[in-house]
Amino acid sequence: MTLLDCGCVEHPYPYCCAHEFHEAPLYRNSRMIVPKGLKTQYNILKFNCLSKLSFNLMENPLVARYVAALVARPLLTKCYTSGVLGFFQEILANHIAGVKFKCSKDAALSARIMAACKMDGRAVKMALYGFFISAPMNHYMNLWMQKWFAGRTSLKSKIGHLCAQMFLVAPIQTLVFLVSMAFIGGARGGKEILSRVRMGYVKMLTLTWLIQPSASFVATRFVPAPLWSLFFNLVGFSVGTYFNVKIKKQAMMVKDAKKKHRRDSSSSSSSSGSSSSSSSDDEK
């Protein structure tokens, strides 16, 4: 979104500095711009509404504190954000997938509460993954991208930035996510981890390519610049929850199939044993 600066000093945020939200007539650097045509008036009205929405959002004390922490300690704030989202992503995926947590009536109160909330050690592992792996990786990759494309505003530079984000950064992030999920899910050994990565890599990367341009468009149009990090974390939270639910459902299907196979084998063995005993009795 192209942000206009009217030189107003009453508002503390540079991306929403317009007095009375740039009501017509519109000003740019204290010079009045006369609207021409219906399309121009529509664009002004749209800009006024988005500016008002951004300013109201930044007036929230929790949002203001988060932005202040993000400015003062960017990496640590992103680590805490990613860790908390990873923790709740696992719990939400357990609820959506319908994972059953068994807990006896004689168990401790804390164990019963954790079973009711569908919280286990995997949620803690997801929080550690978000804090120590996901957030630092995304932070330094974004820094590298900003340094590489700093000062470049041409159309070719924008296309190059989007291509680098989609074909260089996204594949690395997807690979690290799937390897971490396989390890957290109990996979040990290179072959087992590689097989799990192959199952979901292409699907997740394709979905990332579909979502990323639209998410970038929404962020630049509707989300204040200081909250872009949180917005993209929420997008990643949604995508990660979707794939986590799919993985859990597949694992539950495999477990059910194994249980059914064991029951069938046990029933067949018992029936063969009974038939052999009856035949021996007949011979006697």
Image (cartoon, rainbow, N blue to C red):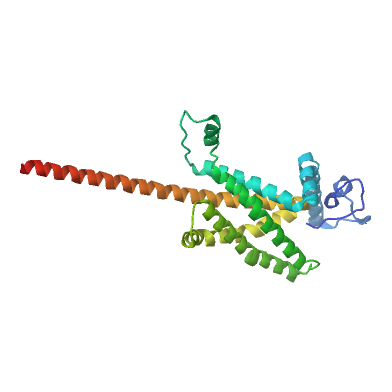
Pick out the residue farthest to the right: 30
> Quadrant location of residue 123?
top right
Up the image or down, 145 lies above or below 80; here it is below
Of residues 210 and 64, the one drawn nearer to the viewer in this rendering: 64
Residue shown at 57% from the left, 61% from the top: 175
Quarter of the image with the N terminus is: bottom right
Compared across the picture, whether 210 is left or right of 158 comes to: left
x and y, in percent, of residue 241 in the image: 57, 49
- Using the image as rendered, state which of residue 122 and residue 207 is in the foreground: 122
> How many marks do you count on the picture?
0
Q: Quadrant of residue 274?
A: top left
- The residue at 45%/51% (across/down) is 250
Q: Is residue 168 above or below residue 96?
A: below
Regarding residue 101, the answer to whether it shows in the image is yes
Residue farthest bottom in this picture: 156
Q: What residue do we see at 67% from left, 67% from top? A: 164
- Please tell me which residue is depicted at 77% across the width and 65% down the height of the picture: 147
Left-right relation of 23 to 155: right
The C terminus sits in image quarter: top left
Instruction: Locate residue 257, reporting x and y percent.
Output: 37, 49
Q: Is 107 positioned to the left or the right of 147 in the image? A: left
Return the x and y of residue 50 as percentages of the image width and height: 78, 49
